[in-house]
Amino acid sequence: MTAKLMTGGPAGAGGTISADGLVVHLIWEGVLLVIAAVVTVAALASTRGATLTSVFDQVGYVGLVATGLAFSLRTGTPNLAVGSIATATGVLGAHLCTVDGWPLWGAMAMAVAGATVTGLIAGLLVAALSVPAWAIP
């Protein structure tokens, strides 16, 4: 017998998540964490003079894009605009830094803030208009 924890399910489908289902999800998240740790240690061990910062510098942007896509997949509404928003964020940050003379951290912070606002607006449009997320980009 399982306890009912949550209703609504992905994209309001009316499904329920049982306590057993939650345990399965938590175990899966733990497996992903272990895999990420193993890959990080392998990257540090395979490169002479590598530091944790240098590993994160190389894969940080992929993690940001993966996080945005993971959020949209977890709600059951995959958003195809994640890649284009990531590209626009990089272009905006580079433009602010090179053409407009902004400091690197300020330019990237502004670009990420713009991407956050764009994603929030897209999410609100999907929720308010009840349209598929792929139709909003």
Image: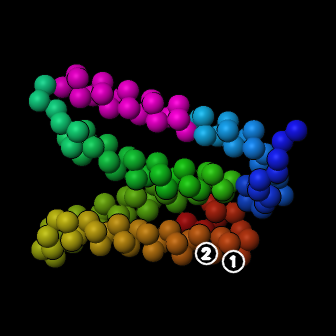
The front one of 117 and 23 is: 23
Q: Which circle marks residue 10 in the picture?
A: none
Membership of 41 in magenta stretch: yes
Q: Which circle marks residue 128 in the picture?
A: 1
Q: Name the quadrant containing residue 25.
A: top right
Which residues, given as a range, are shown in magenta? 29-47
Residue at the spot 61% in from the left edge and 51% down from the top edge:
73
Q: Is residue 33 above or below residue 135?
A: above
Horizontal side, residue 116 vs residue 54: left or right = right
Percent across and percent down for residue 11 are 73, 59
Residue at the spot 37% in from the left edge and 64% down from the top edge:
88
- The number of numbered discs placed on residues in the rendered structure image is 2
Q: Secondary structure at mark 1?
A: helix
Percent across and percent down for residue 61 are 34, 50
Q: Is residue 13 visible?
A: no
Percent across and percent down for residue 123 are 59, 70
Q: Amino acid at mark 2?
A: Leu
Is mark 2 in CB contact (under 8 Å) with mark 1?
yes
Q: Is residue 26 above or below residue 112?
A: above
- Quadrant where the C terminus is found in the figure: bottom right
Q: Give the prevailing secondary structure in the magenta stretch.
A: helix
Q: List the residue tagged with mark 2.
A: 124
The front one of 135 and 78 is: 78
Residue that lies at the very extreme toward the top in this rendered image: 46
Q: Name the quadrant containing residue 106.
A: bottom left
- Quadrant where the N terminus is found in the figure: top right
CA gap between label 2 and label 1 equals 6 Å
Q: Amino acid at mark 1?
A: Ala
Residue at the spot 67% in from the left edge and 38% down from the top edge:
23
